[in-house]
Image (tube, rainbow, N blue to C red):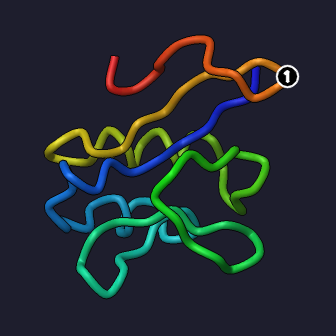
Amino acid sequence: MPYKVKVDRNTCIGAASCVAVAPNTFDLDNEGKAVVKKKDGSTLSDFVAYSDIADEEVNIMNAAKSCPVNAIIIIEVDEQGNEIRQVWPA
């Protein structure tokens, strides 16, 4: 099944552990908050499909698990992109 990932900016403390684990997926913006990097070079905090990210699924999950405040949210989606269930945090 496809997955999407986002950063909860209200929860993010800018620890940057996600950037260290998955630099192809995460970056810090000018406010020191984590953002998701898309293949086209743009960044955002809202849900991004894994297919739009130039990284392996395991790296994205490990980065989410490395976040000390669980600010990275991963959901499983159906073919239309609708949420089926939250995968992380469990």
The one nearer the camera, 6 or 17, is 6
Quarter of the view holding residue 29 = bottom left
Q: Residue at x 47, y 19 (%)?
A: 86
Q: Which residue is mark 1?
A: 79
Q: In the rendered view, tell whether residue 16 sits above or below residue 18.
A: below
- The answer to whether residue 67 is left or right of residue 60 is left
Q: Say left or right for 13 vs 71.
A: left
Q: Residue lying farthest bottom?
A: 30
Image mark count: 1
Per the image, label 1 sits on a secondary structure element best described as loop
Q: Outermost residue toward the top?
A: 84
Q: Is residue 63 above or below residue 87?
A: below
Quarter holding the C terminus is top left
Task: Check disc 1: other Cα within 10 Å, few if <14, some if 14-19, many if 20+.
Answer: few
Q: Is residue 10 above or below residue 27?
A: above
Q: Specify the quadrant of the image occupied by residue 64.
A: top left
The residue sitting at 24% across, 39% down in the picture is 70
Q: Give amino acid for label 1.
A: Glu
Q: Is residue 10 above or below residue 16?
A: above
Q: Identify which residue is drawn at 24% across, 78% down.
A: 32
Specify the farthest residue to the right.
Answer: 79
Rendered location of residue 72, percent (x, y): 36, 44
- The location of residue 57, given as percent across then percent down, is 63, 41
Q: Relative to residue 57, is residue 46 drawn left or right? A: left
- The location of residue 60, given as percent across then percent down, is 52, 47
Could you tell me residue 52's position as x and y percent? 75, 56
Q: Quadrant of the N terminus?
A: top right
